[in-house]
Amino acid sequence: MPRPHGAHTGQALACCTVTPPAAPPTLLARLTVAPALLAVAWLVVGLPLLLAGSFTIGPALLLFPPVAALLLAVCWRGSVRVPASPVVSRFAWWPLTGVLLVTAVFLAVQWEFASEQIIVRRDPATYAQFTAWLNTHGSLPISPSLWAFGGPDPALRFDSPGFYADADGTIVPQFMAGLPLLLAFGGWIGGLPALLAMPPLLGAGAVLTFGGLTARLVGPLWAPVGAAAFALCWPVMFVSRSTYSEAAALVLLLGGLCLLHDVRDVPDGRGRAFLGGLALGLVVLVRIDGLRDILPVVVFAGVLFARRRDAGVPLAAGLLLGAGGGLLEGYLLSGPYLSYLRGSLVPLLAVTGATVLGTVLMAVLWRWKPESFRRGGDWMARGRLPDVAAVLTVLLMVAFAVRPYVQTVRRVPANAEDRFNSDYIAFLQKSVGLPVDGTRQYTELSLHWVSWYVGVPALILATFGAALLLRRILRRESPEWVLPYAVIALTTVATLLRPGITPDHPWASRRLVSIVIPGVILFAVWLLAWATRRVRRTGYGRAVTFLFALTGSVALAVPVALSSAGLVFKPVDQGEAAAVRALCRQFGEGATVLIVERVTADRFSPVIRNTCNIPTARVDGATPTDVQRVADRILSIGRRPVVLGAAASDVAPYGTPIQVVDLHTRQDGHALQSRPRSTWSLTIPAWMSQIPPK
């Protein structure tokens, strides 16, 4: 791709074949793509093994090191172009040292306060139990172990939140397999504690990679500022303390953008282009809605091909391979989950198909009539369109800001899932003292959600930064921003229009982590850097320029830190791992578990089946006669029927009650019209009894 015209040297941190620079910038560029490359290597190894039903520790750990070494060698080959500015040379170690320090502190804090959410209530425990099954069995779907119940019986059910009962009688976990594949590495290495340590590692990888992207797009001196603002943001901490998919998706997305930036001006960048496309495509394996996030990459690959750039075809090939692998896994192993998402997934697939076809048509026409496209670009760059686009960007953000005053978003329940969500929202409204209206979605507050976590100064800086950047892109002044800007802008607007998540916080903040918050911080830091350069060019000395940059950085970071301060050092979901280990020991050998109470069945069915590795079924809709019939069949094959419930009265009809779980801990708070400021108490009880033989 052509070298940017008029781009500031601080924006250049791409790989090229120039004289090798000082070690710190080279190390920064290489280290900040390492998390994505390692994740890609593990997924490239793990996905085929999972599809073959052989995702076991031996083959995975045997294949991973050479694949990872190959990927790192491809992307670390060559040198890095860095600024020749004396300011940068004087502080050559500042970008690398600053980013690594921010990453290390983030990792230490997250590790210390990591969640132990493995008892199923929401997504993190579902992912943890999905991983637990993979660690011990290495294949999908999950077997209900009907033999342990004496065969099928109409009283037995094997579904639970996050786990579907398929038509063939097997159990299919909700969600895509990308995150469980990554978490399985920790589970194999160090059991449950190491599995729960993987989210902080993934989050730290995202912070490191974001620092690298900031260095590439804004300038090396600003990399620690961007990394610090990103690391201080509570939603980033939130998703990297529990087993959420967003941290893994961030590593792949940010790393892919870094790799594609590094292809610029490289004579032989096809390998990096392929790996950048592969990293971006594999986002789909982690989150199916990642298809939307990578649509601009499809168009970008088409533009490169149309302009006869060497990176176009390998980028498209990597993107196709990664996204195709994710879709294949979804179709073969996550079918019920994709069926549940059919209402939103089918339109997304249609848009994706239309984007691919439109890109192919555009590339063909461009190669046939290149002069027409060149003249169109020249006309756009010289005309008033860049100015109009910048103004419209600001007006769009203003529209999102005033949206709550002109719109109230509601959704009338149309199915069982909608009714459950409506009842849950009504429960939360009653709990926090709001008027009860379960149809409220609070979507109109989406931009205000962003301001809760990054602060108003960052939002204002980002708005004007996005407007000015769009103007520069359309005037061909910042070509290195074309792809990152398109990815950020498309996903941010789509997310703000329709977050598509239950609107209690911090839960709903997950939707902002993948693109919106990184984009806001990146735009804000870019505007600070741009303004600092303008101050310097007007003739002010280095001291004044430094003071301006420092003041702007503090104004950006302090509101972010203040919004997180009340929750950073408040651990949640502690004690769950110990409670589950004690529960597993209580059952002993030869047990078959029957859960007779609904909430206990929702919470513990996957835990006992996947972590304790004990056959489990729910019979919460059955009569005592049905339970006894199933118990007799279990006894007839020489196993011990164990009954589990939430209270002693649930299990007393079947034997002597014994309390096996009495967990008192804290959970994330719930807020609907403000950012969360506290945690809530949580009590999880469980009682068991054993049905004796007659």
Image (cartoon, rainbow, N blue to C red):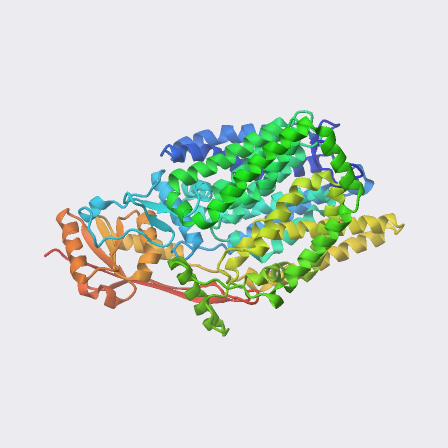
Relative image position of residue 472 (x, y in whole percent): 76, 44
Q: Can residue 557 be seen in this view?
A: no
Among the 4 quarters of the image, the one containing residue 631: bottom left
> In the depicted view, which residue is nearer to us: 61 or 501?
501
Q: Quadrant of the N terminus?
A: top right
- Residue 363 placement, left or right of 603: right
Question: So how many labels did they put on this image?
Answer: 0
In percent of the image, x 19 and y 50: which residue is there? 153
Q: Is residue 518 visible?
A: yes
- Residue 38 placement, left or right of 626: right
In percent of the image, x 37 and y 32: which residue is there? 52
Which residue is at the far right?
539
Relative image position of residue 551 (x, y in whole percent): 76, 58
> In the depicted view, which residue is nearer to us: 322 or 609?
322
Among the 4 quarters of the image, the one containing residue 397: bottom right
- Residue 185 placement, left or right of 383: left
Relative image position of residue 17 (x, y in whole percent): 72, 26
Relative image position of residue 565 (x, y in whole percent): 60, 62
Which residue is at the far top?
268
Q: In which quarter of the image is the C terminus?
A: bottom left
> In the depicted view, which residue is nearer to us: 256 or 85?
256
In the image, residue 249 sits, relative to residue 270, either above or below, namely: below
